Image (cartoon, rainbow, N blue to C red):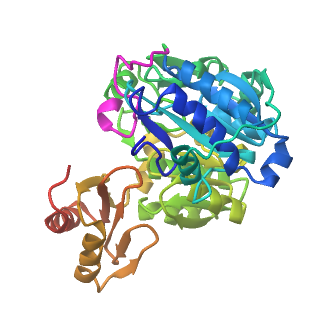
Amino acid sequence: MAGIFKAYDVRGLYPSQLHDELAYQIGLAYRAVLDEDDLRHGGGKIVVGRDMRPHSVPLQQRLIEGLRDSGLHVVDIGLATTPMNYFAVGHLGASGGIQVTASHNPAEYNGIKFSKREARPVSGDHGIPLIESKVTTGDLSKAAERGGYETTEIMEAYRAFLLGQLHRPEGAARLKVVVDAANGMGTIYQPILEQAHIELIPLYFELDGSFPNHEANPLKLANLRDLSAAVREYDADLGISFDGDADRSAFVDENGEPVGNDLTTALIAGEMLGEHSGSVVAYDLRSSRAVAEYIEEKGGQPVRERVGHSFIKATLRKHDGIFGGELAGHYYFRDTYTADNALLAAFHVFNLLWQTGRTFSELVRPLQRYAKSEETNFQVEDKQGKIELLAEKYSDGEIDYLDGITVQYDDWWFNVRPSNTEPYLRMVAEAKDQAQLDTRMAELIGLLGDPV
């Protein structure tokens, strides 16, 4: 079990690390993270779904047995994307939800994602660490009365909700869109996309947990090559790539050029603020300065937040925010219980293209105000020591420790933060131009060591 209980989920190799019996134990332990409000709100009903990996079937089955033995009532939605699970939790008024998926990880992995009522994240000391403690110590008890079980179909309600978010002006040109499902769960969105007033060009829309074409991780540029090539080949208006459980998306413009997820966050925010002026929009601190600038220009209130879905969601709930986005391609909406929804993000991009009549690259260009690095990883033994070294070296800058260390100057800034899931420090930097960025990146690499 070592190392499989992560900050936000459970994830490991199947069956050597995460196996069926462990899934049963996790099912028994999960009830402990639900408080009285959760149980009263949903009557102890828990939505359970799974992805297309073959071993997700036995894992889900044993997980369900554990949940029922703990006294919880299971609502099985079968094959589903993670955003569908979140939607079902809120739509059905359940006490919580669990999705069996390893997201973008390779075929030999599997995992389990958790939520509470209204798709609230399971996080903090009373979240996954509590589940881990109960499993490792054997502090697991069965309820006097076993919970019930039912299956339900959520796709029709989900489809109706999503299609209701499309706002295509009369006479607007039909968009030609390439979508790369990467053989993952985004495949099951095909019926929705075919009703979205677009010409759909599907790429790798066959469910296959072995991921035969490429990794289901759109954050890696190498995994966007086929999408970019198809956009150019078919003269499409844009391309969209989903990850394995379809809770993240990445976009390429009509030229096949990748669009930074932080800039997509800004564009979606601008589109939504047209009807919700003055609303809070949350963004993660790795994002370009252009994001906050653009949100303000569009009449919104930008709120900078640390990396991680639980923090973005909490910020949106605190401020009744309309929308939030992360550099990793997670997009959060008030209308989906502040949970991430990659397909809804795509629909808002469609709305923007229809309403403006402009190309994707034309919309992005005004946001390309600075030169920005990709997030770069460094394997560092003494993470805190390196952060203190950076604080001393750049003590004349404006420093904060919201997540790792961020140092800001008028003409450049950087963030270095410890990974929540891997033994790395992660660094991102931005400057007024490429020459300045190159100089500052060389400085930082000299201090942090060779990138991995």
**Which of 284 and 359 lies nearest the eye of the viewer?**
284
Q: Main secondary structure of the magenta part?
A: loop
Q: Quadrant of residue 351?
A: top right
Residue 64 % position (x, y): 67, 27
Quadrant of the rendering where the N terminus is positioned = top left
Please report the bounds of the magenta region as a residue range: 207-224
- Would you place residue 180 above or below residue 286 in this image? above
Residue 416 % position (x, y): 33, 65
Would residue 40 appear left or right of 13 to someone viewing this image? right
- Would you place residue 280 above or below residue 122 in this image? below
Name the residue: 63% across, 36% down. 27
**Which of 102 and 5 lies nearest the eye of the viewer?**
5
Name the residue: 69% across, 33% down. 67
Name the residue: 58% across, 65% down. 302
- Would you place residue 92 above or below residue 447 in this image? above
Q: How many marks?
A: 0
